[in-house]
Amino acid sequence: MAAGGRVIKNNIEVFLFSIKCNYKLNEPLSKHTTLGIGGNADYFVEVETENQLISLLKFINENKIKFFVIGGGSNLLFSDEGFKGIVIKLSGYFCKYEISQNNVVCGAAISLSYLAQQTAKQGLSGLEYLSSIPGTVGGAVFGNAGVKNYPISSVIDKIEVVDYYGEKRVLTKNDIKFEYRESNLNGNIITKIFIVLKNADKNDILKTISQEFERRKNSQPIGTKNAGCIFKNPKDDSAGRLIDSLNLKNYSVGGITISDVHANFFINKNNGCAKDMINLIKFVTNKVDERYNIKLETEIKIIK
Ligand code: EPU
């Protein structure tokens, strides 16, 4: 058998070929993360339908293969050694959306900012404050992404998930525990999201979106290779403010530099690697702890 003219070497490839999944071998994860960091994934698989996803998860489970589902790659740090297993990227069916009155049903892989624009154009309010958050809707729900008092959980009605054994389930908002930048959805792959929005004046919503974009442009290093805020905010404070107060803006470890715009953003300026990032995170965590006795926790996900 052959895929793209290439000889298929092992049972993983035979299986992927049998369920008609596109895949790449030794794919650089730096191409799939906003930080531009990460070694190679053994297998990088594009899953286009729910049946493919279910079959693949069953296969992964039976064969005890390590796997990870990647969204927009905007909140992730993969190691320099890469990922010894299968990285799954949802596409196709998972990028579709439908708007009916004030209900939105969307696939997990659609971009949150794109969806916010589309709903705004229909005079639907609820996503405008989230419009400048990079990444996919699925990723945002998983990590309960938000801006100030607007977490994405506030507009969720229910979601569909496939668990790691390949079983499909529907979870209503009451079944899910959403917290600050967290949910209890570990062990599940979010596939579909049901959102309820409110009717409002289209121009007001579009104005909020552009104000939100301006605010971000002035207070965050847009257009650089970053992963958003590195640390969660400690209770009643801002990690960015704490790091800034220690005069650490522009401080670098290897190719990673603390932004001079917002100190909770670490930028891959100069071919930085995961090791540099981890060392900078450790350095900053120690400095903040020494000075303030506050133990910062990372918001980005570090994948080993
Ligand atoms: N500040 C500084 N120096 C800095 C950064 C911030 O003094 O380098 C001060 C600001 O002047 C302000 C306060 O700290 O007085 C709070 O800053 P900001 O309004 O930027 O908010 P934040 O708490 O740092 C949070 C979210 C951001 C989100 C903004 C929206 C977290 C960890 N961060 O940042 O989310 O965009 O509010 O205003 O919850 C993300 O989650 O990746 C993220 C970037």
Image (cartoon, rainbow, N blue to C red):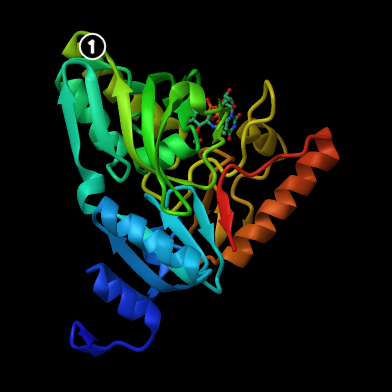
In the image: residue 113, left or right of residue 164: left
How many numbered marks appear?
Answer: 1
Residue visible at 26% across and 46% down in the picture? 94
Quadrant that contains the N terminus: bottom left
Rendered image quadrant of residue 170? top left
Which residue in the structure is indicated by mark 1?
A: 204
Residue drawn at (38%, 27%), measured in percent from left and top?
158
- Secondary element at image label 1: helix
Residue in front for this viewpoint, 166 or 35 = 166
Q: Is residue 149 left or right of residue 249?
A: left
Q: Is residue 193 left or right of residue 250?
A: left
Residue 127, horizontal then vertical, whole percent = 32, 23
Relative to residue 86, is residue 26 depicted above or below?
Answer: below
Considering depth in this image, is 82 or 50 the residue closer to the camera? 50
Question: Looking at the image, which is closer to me, 23 or 9?
Answer: 9
What kind of residue is marked 1? Asp
With respect to residue 16, does 105 lie above or below?
above
**Horizontal placement of 22 versus 225: left or right?**
left
Is residue 276 at least partly visible in the picture?
yes
| Image x and y of residue 66, in percent | 52, 67
Image quadrant in which you'd find residue 232: top right
| Residue 133 point in image, percent of width and height | 39, 35
Q: Is residue 67 above or below residue 245?
A: below
* Residue 270 visible somewhere in the drawing: no
